Amino acid sequence: MQNLHSEVVTHMSPDRERLEKELAETLAEIEQLNKKLEDKADYGIGKGSPTIYEWEFNLALRQSLEAKAKSIRAALRKMQEGSYGICEVCGQKIDDERLAVLPHTTLCIKCAQTKR
Ligand SMILES: [Zn+2]
């Protein structure tokens, strides 16, 4: 009788929790960067000002974070569809070890290497 509710919990996989946490963190980072980027006027950007490099760096960083958030969302969608962990290119199962390091990857190690 005391195990009545334990089934419900097992439906939530640790991978999914991890991805959702990572997505939340990534979105928080983007928000912080957005604030920094909005401050552009206060930097007093002029010729030879080093702050422009920082601003451009933050902009590039935001772009890569946005790409990351996008791929995490795609991975979460795949989990719902049941196609998570399947390589987009060759359709093979992606190594568990690779997914542990890169939980939102959509390519197996082979395809990721040939793509480069
Ligand atoms: Zn592949």
Image (cartoon, rainbow, N blue to C red):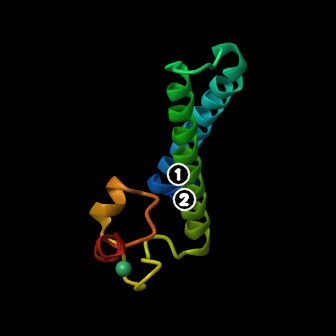
Which quadrant holds residue 107? bottom left
Q: CA distance from mark 2 to mark 1?
A: 5 Å
Residue tagged 1:
68
The residue at 59%/48% (across/down) is 66
Quadrant location of residue 32?
top right
Q: Nearer the viewer, residue 96 or 89?
A: 89
The amino acid on which the numbered mark 1 sits, given as a three-letter code, is: Lys
Disc 2 residue type? Ser
Report the residue marked by disc 2.
Answer: 71
| Residue 38 % position (x, y) | 71, 25
Residue 2 can be seen in this image: no
* Label at residue 33: none
Dot 2 falls on a residue whose secondary structure is helix
Task: In this rendered view, identify the residue nearer to me: 94 or 109.
Answer: 109
| Camera sees residue 70 | yes
Does dot 1 land on a helix, a strand or a loop? helix
Q: Is residue 61 above or below residue 114?
A: above
Pointer 2 with pointer 1, Cβ within 8 A? yes
Residue found at x 53% / y 18%: 49
